[in-house]
Amino acid sequence: MIKINKLTKVFKTQGETITALDAVDLHIKKSEFVAIMGRSGSGKSTLLNILGCMDKSTSGEYLLSDQDVSQLNDDELSKIRNQRIGFVFQGFHLLPRLSALENVMLPLRYTGVNLTDAGRIRAEKLLIKVGLKDRINHMPNQMSGGQIQRVAIARSLINDPDILLADEPTGNLDSTISDQIMDLLIELNKSGQTIVMVTHEDDIAEHANRTIHFLDGAIVK
């Protein structure tokens, strides 16, 4: 699903050169659940941004299902970001004035899917799948943190993405709700969803099939 060869990312700020990723090689198979760990500044978030087509590498190769993403322009990257990649963030990022259903349907605005028929049915099915059958028309301020994160997960799946990228998905949740969110991600992975998750918590990373440790822009374990 993902092939990264000699991926390098260099930032230049105020005359200083910082190597965030240093010739990283990484392959992730379809239907894998991979956790990425490392201290702040280790390169894990930079990698996730590149995998999610939100940033470009300085050099190296990034293949997504054999397509060389590193050679695409901004419009092409935007299309892949919307149609082939799902995002789950620590901060949820729901729009407060939209219901759970409307938040889940939001990415469909950029794909041409009918927002009143097929899209609505798909969104409702996803909310039921993540255990929110009785919260479909609730607003974010009417839901708990765990329920809001479930809405965010449903939203990330609305376009049937090739990969799901999760950035500290349990970072704002207590331990009980964190376990519930991880159980949901495990269930999605068992159904065939490829997941790449950044976390700093060992007990959360243990739910993945494989854990990759970063330090100073390189894979060390």
Image (cartoon, rainbow, N blue to C red):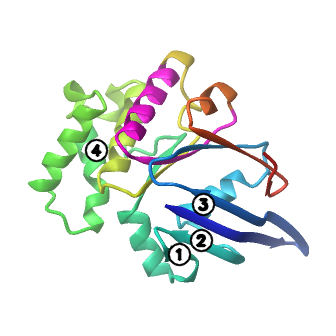
Query: Can you tell which mark lies on residue 49?
Result: 3
Work out how far the residue at label 3 is from the one at label 1, CA to CA, in angstroms.
13 Å
Task: Give the class, few, some or many, for how many residues have Cα within 10 Å of label 3's Cα (few <14, many ≥20).
Answer: some
Question: What kind of residue is marked 3?
Answer: Asn
Q: Residue at x 53, y 67 (%)?
A: 53
Work out how far the residue at label 1 is from the one at label 4, CA to CA, in angstroms.
33 Å
> Mark 1 sits on what residue?
69
> Mark 4 sits on what residue?
98
Query: Can you tell which mark lies on residue 218?
Result: none
Q: In the rendered view, does 65 fall on the left or right side of 118? A: right
- Residues shaded magenta: 177-200
Q: Please say if 120 is above or below 100.
A: below
Looking at the image, is mark 1 or mark 4 earlier in the sequence? 1
Of badges 4 and 2, nearer the viewer stands 2
Q: Secondary structure at mark 1?
A: helix
Image location of residue 178, percent across then percent down: 52, 24
Q: How many marks?
A: 4
Query: Can you tell which mark lies on residue 62?
Result: 2
Looking at the image, is mark 2 or mark 3 earlier in the sequence? 3
Q: Residue at x 34, y 38 (%)?
A: 151
Work out how far the residue at label 3 is from the one at label 4, CA to CA, in angstroms.
26 Å
Q: Secondary structure at mark 4?
A: loop
